[in-house]
Amino acid sequence: MEVDCIPFQQTGYFSSLLCDYLEEKEGLKPFYNRFPHLENFEAQLLEKSASFPHENRPALVNALKLQYDNVEVSPTTQEKIAALSDKHTFTVVTGHQLNLFTGPLYFLYKIISTINLTEKLKETYPKYEFVPIYWMATEDHDFDEINYFNFKGKKIQWNTEASGGVGRLETKGLEEVLTVIKAQFGTTDFAKELIRLFENAYNDHSNLAEATRYLANTLFGSHGLVIVDGDDAALKEMLVPYMKKDIFEQQPFHEVSASIDALSKVSEAYTIQVNPREINYFYLKDGLRERIVERKGIYHVNDTELQFSQAELEQEMHSHPERFSPNVIARPLYQEVILPNLCYIGGGGELAYWLELKTYFEGLNVTFPMLLLRNSALVLTQKQKDKCKKLGVNEADLFLEQHSLINKKIREISNITIDFSPQKKVLDKQFEDLYDLALQTDKSFLGAVKAQEVKQKKGLDHLEKRLLQAQKRKLKDHVVRITALQNELFPNQSLQERQLNFSELYLEYGSSLISDLKGSLQPLQHEFLVLRN
């Protein structure tokens, strides 16, 4: 694919917090460990190597082997899992929800960014091994966020009753979805491949975690991707000491609250992504994921009859660690406790809440990972590329707000000049002379001069807008085509990657989509990519 780059700051789709982070603004430096430049990974390697308990490695490898027990594992992934036993092996992690059929397109970008970074690190630091990790958010319980994907502007949705962690949800009831996608995808060879992928994932696997593992493994297993399900008793056993610090001492609540206050003082423009709770764990069983809350020394499972004394809850942690599910504040710590991880790759919203967590990690003596914004991209098909060329629209123009894009293009193609700047300059000179005259005669005349200046400039603005509107009507066909093109590339005035499912591009490119993206996405480039085939 041909690749063009646009600074994230110029797209208009990324927050001031994220843009300041990418620019390495001084005020944000206390909130992260090291910025993800390639040369900074050496110090991160040394720090993580010194702090990560070697005894965690066998438990991690054993848990992963059990999780992959009934999965067809590529030789590359087998090698990566085995390598985690060695002290010279480290991970790069991304995480994502269990969205139906992968959900939005950026699912692919996250994982490919992760794989590509591990390969780049291996080139630069050859004495180490690097493992790309996809952390499945199997314990999330917001089913409405994940039970659909978009296809050509339509919402394809799985309608069923759900409660508890979504990873445990049975895949029954997806026959209706399969019927819909068969009708929507068509009968091409690429469509048949997609339909077979959906059937194999959801018909042949009993729950959503297994189905999602199958999807990700099928798409990326040949590149050595290792998929982790945190809903695992053996893995959570390593988290128990940190659970106690959270539930009984409320350490994260105090540390993260202080970080949020400090972050807010850096800039009023920063939006706080998540707020900590006094207790950042849920109680998890089949069909149940409810907050643990403390009232008068008794620990209650919210909206249930379950309750524990401190001693009983501590015993429950040791007997059934799998029943304690970390929330958005505690989950990052869980990941870093059980993995020899160097870097987390996420979207803008994810990085925003990670920036709240550094002092919390420091207080628990857990190395804070480097934070890397995942690759973002706009993919143009050949047909869309031809439309851009015919309409005289460049890639940067596409990111303008729609009214700004239309106004800009109408001014460019109009056979008359729709810019009254020269007239405004003449007006400015005339009023400069009038102000001088007023100062030399009667200063009370200044108010009248100012009023007249405002009136005449407003009049020119009004005439300019009327002329622009008239030209829009005259060039209506061009306006309609530009609008249609931008709506096609930015559905719902949002980034393509947040709306489209990968299936739309797969129908165009087939299995080469993965290899094309892998060859184009450069995770350390720190720019928005425009990809053209």
Image (cartoon, grey):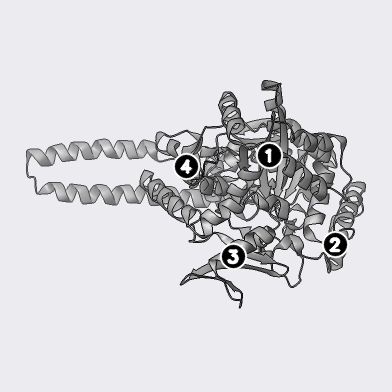
Q: Residue furthest bottom?
A: 305
| Mark 2 surroundings: few (<14), some (14-19) or many (≥20) residues within 10 A | some
| Mark 1 surroundings: few (<14), some (14-19) or many (≥20) residues within 10 A | few
Query: Residue drawn at (53%, 42%), measured in percent from left and top?
Result: 408
Give the structural element (helix, strand or loop) at label 1: loop
| Mark 4 surroundings: few (<14), some (14-19) or many (≥20) residues within 10 A | some
Q: Is residue 28 above or below residue 500?
A: above
Please state which amino acid type lies under the numbered disc 1. Glu
Which residue position is annotated with label 1? Answer: 55
In depth, the one of 266 and 531 nearer the eye is 266
Which residue position is annotated with label 4? Answer: 418
Contact check, label 2 and label 1, Cβ < 8 Å? no
Contact check, label 3 and label 4, Cβ < 8 Å? no
Instruction: Tell me the distance, in whole angstroms, between the alpha carbons under discs 1 and 3.
Output: 26 Å
Q: Is residue 433 above or below residue 141?
A: above
Q: Quadrant of residue 61?
A: top right
Which quarter shows the N terminus?
Answer: top right
Please state which amino acid type lies under the numbered disc 4. Ile
Q: Is residue 25 left or right of residue 193?
A: left
Residue 261 - label: none
Which residue position is annotated with label 2? Answer: 206
Contact check, label 1 and label 3, Cβ < 8 Å? no
Give the percent coordinates (x, y) of residue 212: 79, 53
Residue 313 - label: 3
Give the percent coordinates (x, y) of residue 51: 58, 35
In depth, the one of 309 and 77 nearer the eye is 309
Instruction: Tell me the distance, in whole angstroms, between the alpha carbons under discs 3 and 4.
Output: 72 Å
Disc 2 versus disc 1: nearer the observer: 1
Give the structural element (helix, strand or loop) at label 4: loop
Q: Is residue 393 in view?
A: no
Q: Is residue 218 in view?
A: yes
